[in-house]
Amino acid sequence: MSLALATRTNVTIEELVDQFIGAKAAETAATKQRVAIEEQMIALLGKRDEGSDTHELANGFKVTITGKQTYTADMEKLHAICAKLPEDMRPIKTKVELDQTGAKYLRANEPAIWAQLAQAITVKPAKTGVEVKA
């Protein structure tokens, strides 16, 4: 399989699928290689649990290693504890966002309601997905 992109106009879908499969395989291999290199760099330079360190190299490059941690919570338990704490000490956010599923339903099934909502909602095409299965 060649990774050269098809540029002729009479390319077949089968040829494009072959190129797609080859490109996906190359992408997967490149990602694995990059991650392995990152792990080696971290082993040489060290890491923090949280925060970053920048290392200036002899060749002029700068390498920044950033450590991160994720936080999850038993929200029921957290709400009960936070109810007893001062409001400015409660690590809880309430995020208000568009319900995309509800908006899709209203656009398709409730044109009068949608006409009102459409003034505040922008709909634009997202990237079209392609999946190939054997």
Image (cartoon, helix red, strand yellow):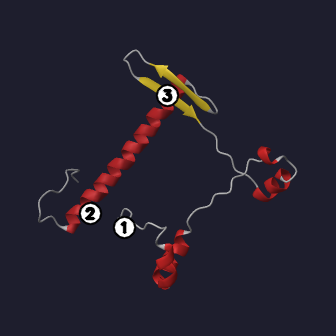
- The label on residue 82 is none
Q: Could you say which is closer to the camera, residue 110 or residue 32?
A: 110
**Residue at 20% over, 63% down:** 15
Q: Are marks 2 and 1 in contact (CB under 8 Å)?
A: no
Please tell me how crowded label 3 is: few (under 14), some (14-19), or many (20+) other residues with Cα within 10 Å.
Answer: some
Q: Earlier in the sequence, mark 3 or mark 1?
A: 3
- Label 1 secondary element: loop
- The label on residue 133 is 1
**Please, what is the three-letter code of the amino acid marked with disc 2?**
Val
Q: CA distance from mark 3 to mark 1?
A: 39 Å
Given the current orientation, which residue lies at the most extreme top position? 58
Q: CA distance from mark 2 to mark 3?
A: 38 Å
**Please, what is the three-letter code of the amino acid marked with disc 3?**
Thr
Q: Earlier in the sequence, mark 2 or mark 3?
A: 2
User: Mark 2 highlights which residue?
Assistant: 17
Position of 14 with respect to 112 (left or right) is left
Which numbered mark, 2 or 3, is in the foreground of this view?
Answer: 3
**Please, what is the three-letter code of the amino acid marked with disc 1?**
Lys
User: Mark 3 highlights which residue?
Assistant: 64
Residue 83 x %, y %: 85, 54
Q: Could you say which is closer to the camera, residue 108 or residue 17?
A: 108
**Residue at 47% over, 78% down:** 115
Residue 134 x %, y %: 35, 68
Say which quarter of the image contains residue 34.
top left
Residue 56 x %, y %: 45, 18
Say which quarter of the image contains residue 129.
bottom left
Please tell me how crowded label 1 is: few (under 14), some (14-19), or many (20+) other residues with Cα within 10 Å.
Answer: few
Q: Earlier in the sequence, mark 2 or mark 1?
A: 2
**Residue at 23% over, 50% down:** 3
Q: Are marks 3 and 1 in contact (CB under 8 Å)?
A: no
- Label 3 secondary element: strand
Residue 84 x %, y %: 88, 51
